[in-house]
Image (spheres, rainbow, N blue to C red):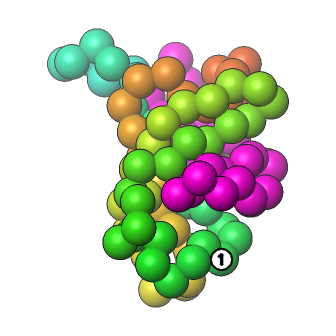
């Protein structure tokens, strides 16, 4: 599978509250563990206590929902998000990256 990127709208559920966000996500099938690893960036501002309140979130894209972890707040005031398993985006919805 070629690497690809989903860049677009999503719905993030954090601490029981939902918010519309923009994300850029990518992933790959790991040949060692046989699982799909995906990660990316949430560009919209999250509450200051997003890492303390709940690092487990739900991310929904086009009706597909996946649990994920808020990994860190970046120096650019975005948040990194990641998980292992089925991603929230359809794999046929990603675009090729050159």
- In this rendering, does residue 49 appear at all? yes
Q: Residue at x 60, y 73 (%)?
A: 46
- In this rendering, does residue 96 appear at all? no
Quarter of the figure with residue 60:
top right
Q: Residue at x 69, y 70 (%)?
A: 44
52 up-or-down from 86: above or below? below
**As drawn, is 60 to the left or to the right of 63?**
left
Between 93 and 54, the residue placed more toward the observer is 54
Is residue 14 within the magenta segment? Answer: yes
Quarter of the figure with residue 23:
bottom right
**As drawn, is 71 to the left or to the right of 94?**
left
Residue 31 position, x and y percent, is 27, 17
| Magenta span: chief secondary structure | strand
Residue 41 position, x and y percent, is 56, 60
In the image, the segment drawn in magenta is: 1-28
Q: Which residue is mark 1?
A: 45
Between 97 and 61, the residue placed more toward the observer is 61
């Amino acid at each position: 599978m070629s690497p690809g990127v989903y860049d677009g709208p999503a719905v993030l559920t954090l601490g029981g509250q939902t918010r519309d966000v923009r994300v850029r996500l990518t992933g790959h099938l790991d040949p060692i563990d046989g699982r799909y690893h995906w990660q990316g960036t949430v560009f919209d501002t999250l509450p200051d206590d997003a890492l303390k309140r709940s690092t487990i979130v739900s991310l929904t894209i086009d009706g597909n929902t996946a649990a994920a972890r808020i990994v860190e707040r970046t120096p650019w005031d975005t948040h990194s998000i990641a998980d292992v398993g089925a991603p929230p985006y359809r794999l046929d919805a990603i675009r090729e990256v050159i």
